[in-house]
């Protein structure tokens, strides 16, 4: 028969410590949160050996009185929560009164604290949660806690710690998240004697964003201005669509100032980039959501990193709309900037590792700096994508309205819309005969008049990129990607997509499996622009198709569509997008073929006037810019 007895307070603390204190970064997190709750404006975190042997958190907050300080280390001692109602509306980061007791139970602690205006401060020393000494001490206003020898009395737990470097990395994340959510606090992280992270505490979010994301990624960021929706507010910084990363490690979400992991917010952010970011790449950013305290429960996880929203849909919507609008408003044309390659000088002594890191980004040091290479012509890799200047943004905004374009639905498409013979080659048709556009181009003057916006199409290079200029500089447009995007948008809007009636229907032969897929989802195939009917076993008759599609491509497009229908587990709208991609890609002007200047000009106009055409459906940019200033720099016409 079991004998029930109460756990000793020390044992209870140890068990609680298992939940709250998992590794040095969890200690850092709790202590930094206490410092924030204490109203500090400057918080310094210092660590050695990944925070295992030494972790010090110093703040300039309210401090504790001589009566309160020892009590703070008792379990469930808190100054932040008094009633059950308080629990429903938690505004401070800490609330359980558990952290100090739990941390103290598995470490040696020195606490120095002095309240604002108090004559003397206080020093406490604790080991394994037991108060050893308590004495008056001269110390600065605020609180400093030094935590040594984590898990010294529970060696089994030591085994679960990782290498110092990894543990230090976790602590860096803790400080970064705190800094992002509190631009008004100056944070500093010192690792083994070196400052590795700092923010100025001047209250502007861009400062911690710069410190966390680094110079290059920050240059590719857009501000999400404060957006109100469904009684909540969203703001932050997110990257432009062309700056996707291979993973989600640079996504940071905050709810009411608290860093959280939220699949819901992640999904909303990524949805905002749909069809704008390359498949397999992920957006980065810091997104802040503020909502009534009662609409969110932070009490579901011991480390308080997960939240529960009382209603998910409005949260998703608020985050999605704020991010989507930011992406729309921004000028998403990546800009080429020239980066001088420097010969390898002895690197200047760095104040700290963070500066060294930024320096590494900023200067590409060439190890092989023989004199012969000094006058090298600039190479492509010398160009970096960067944000457009304010003037360019303004310029883009004042472009005049577009005149009708051959890419508009109500104007005949660049090649015959109707009717065409199935076997006949059109402009985009395969075969060796020159595309019709070439002939037209030859008959036209070599350079066209400027568009009404002041953009002049100069021509194309590699039969792939349109070259144009405006008063800011050069514009390069990937003609296939741009046209593909225009068609994609049209098909997706399900309006105005001209169709071509085929004089003789194209008979498409499929495998039994493919035919089954098309048969069962024939409405979806029709939605993307085909008049298609079953025509005997495993065959279909196509009587009309999207206008730009070469009739010779119909067989291959339908069989590609059937493969997508077979393999896709996506929900219907996503699947439709996939089908539309296929059609748009096939129908778009191909790279590697000459296109007439009129068509180039139309395409250019469409791209410059329609920000929804700035990336192809797979997220690759359609347009890049090289400013005149950057060119002048290349030719040394300006001082740099
Ligand atoms: P909680 O943060 O959940 O209240 P803790 O165990 O982390 O519980 O802290 C207990 C109490 O100690 C806090 O409520 C607060 O009153 C006090 N305290 C802890 N750290 C600080 C600090 N850095 N400055 C001022 N007071 C502090
Ligand atoms: Mg706390």
Image: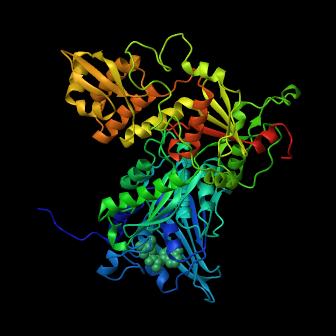
Given the current orientation, which residue lies at the most extreme left position? 1
From this viewpoint, is residue 125 visible? no
Query: Front-most of 257 and 507?
Result: 507
**Relative to 195, 415 lies left or right:** left
- Of the 4 image quadrants, the one containing the N terminus is bottom left
User: Hey, which quadrant is residue 513 in on the image?
Assistant: top left
Residue 123 in sight here: yes
Q: In which quarter of the view is residue 372 placed?
A: top right
User: What residue appears at the point 47 percent right and 67 percent down from the top-left corner?
Assistant: 257
User: Which residue occupies the foreground of this view, 7 or 471?
Assistant: 471
Pick the residue in front: 422 or 582.
Answer: 422
Q: Nearer the viewer, residue 233 or 430?
A: 430
Rendered residue at 34%/67% (across/down):
296
Q: Is residue 118 above or below residue 371?
A: below
Rendering coords of residue 142 (x, y %): 59, 78
Residue located farthest toward the top when viewing the structure as drawn: 432
Residue 9 at x, y = what percent? 33, 72
Q: Residue at x 28, y 32 (%)?
A: 526
């Amino acid at each position: 028969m079991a004998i029930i007895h109460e756990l000793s307070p020390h044992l209870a603390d140890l068990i609680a410590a298992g939940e709250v204190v998992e590794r040095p970064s969890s200690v850092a997190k709790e202590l930094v949160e206490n410092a924030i709750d204490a109203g500090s404006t400057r918080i310094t975190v210092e660590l050695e050996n990944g925070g295992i042997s030494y972790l010090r958190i110093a703040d300039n907050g309210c401090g504790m009185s001589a009566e309160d300080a020892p009590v703070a280390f008792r379990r469930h001692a808190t100054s932040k929560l008094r009633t059950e109602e308080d629990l429903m509306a938690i505004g401070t980061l800490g609330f359980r009164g558990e952290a100090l007791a739990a941390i103290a139970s598995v470490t040696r602690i020195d606490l120095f604290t002095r309240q604002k205006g108090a004559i003397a401060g206080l020093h406490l020393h604790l080991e394994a949660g037991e108060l050893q000494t308590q004495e008056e001490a001269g110390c600065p206003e605020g609180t400093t806690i030094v935590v040594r020898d984590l898990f010294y009395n529970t060696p089994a737990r030591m085994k679960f710690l990782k290498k110092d470097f990894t543990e230090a990395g976790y602590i860096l994340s803790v400080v970064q998240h705190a800094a992002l959510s509190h631009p008004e606090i100056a944070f500093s992280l010192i690792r083994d004697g070196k400052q590795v992270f700092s923010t100025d505490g001047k209250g502007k979010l861009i400062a911690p964003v710069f410190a966390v994301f680094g110079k290059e990624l920050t240059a590719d960021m857009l501000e999400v201005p404060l957006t109100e929706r469904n009684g909540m507010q969203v703001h932050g910084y997110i990257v432009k669509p062309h700056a996707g990363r291979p993973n989600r490690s640079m996504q940071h979400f905050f709810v009411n100032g608290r860093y959280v992991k939220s699949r819901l917010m992640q999904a909303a952010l990524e949805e905002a980039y749909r069809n704008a970011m390359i498949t397999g790449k992920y957006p980065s950013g810091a997104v802040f959501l503020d909502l009534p305290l009662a609409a969110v429960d932070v009490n579901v996880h011991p480390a308080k990193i997960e939240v529960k929203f009382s209603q998910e849909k409005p949260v998703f919507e608020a985050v999605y709309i704020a991010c989507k609008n930011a992406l729309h408003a921004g000028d998403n044309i990546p800009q080429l900037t020239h980066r001088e390659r420097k010969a390898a000088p002895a690197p200047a002594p760095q104040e700290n590792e963070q500066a060294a890191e930024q320096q590494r980004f900023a200067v590409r040091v060439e190890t092989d700096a023989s004199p012969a290479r000094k006058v090298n012509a600039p190479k492509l890799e010398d160009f970096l994508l960067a944000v457009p200047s304010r003037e360019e943004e303004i310029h883009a905004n004042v472009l005049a309205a577009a005149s009708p374009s051959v890419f508009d639905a109500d104007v005949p498409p660049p090649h015959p819309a109707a009717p065409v013979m199935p076997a006949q080659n059109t402009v985009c048709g395969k075969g060796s005969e020159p595309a019709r556009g070439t002939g037209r181009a030859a008959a036209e003057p070599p350079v066209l008049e400027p568009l009404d916006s002041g953009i002049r199409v100069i021509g194309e290079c590699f039969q792939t990129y349109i070259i144009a200029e405006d008063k800011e500089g050069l514009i390069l447009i990937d003609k296939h990607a741009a046209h593909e995007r225009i068609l994609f948008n049209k098909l997706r809007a399900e309006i105005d997509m001209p169709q071509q009636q085929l004089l003789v229907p194209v008979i498409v032969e499929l495998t039994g499996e493919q035919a089954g897929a098309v048969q069962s989802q024939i409405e979806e195939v029709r939605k993307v622009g085909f008049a298609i009917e079953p025509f005997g076993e495993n065959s279909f008759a196509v009587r009309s198709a999207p206008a730009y599609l070469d009739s010779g491509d119909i067989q291959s497009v339908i069989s590609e569509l059937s493969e997508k229908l077979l393999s896709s587990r996506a929900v219907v709208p996503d699947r439709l997008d996939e089908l539309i991609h296929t059609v748009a890609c096939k129908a778009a002007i191909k790279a590697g073929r000459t296109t007439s200047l009129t068509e180039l000009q139309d395409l250019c106009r469409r791209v410059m006037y329609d920000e929804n055409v700035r990336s192809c459906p797979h997220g690759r940019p359609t347009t890049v810019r090289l400013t005149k200033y950057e060119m002048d720099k290349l030719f040394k016409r300006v001082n740099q």
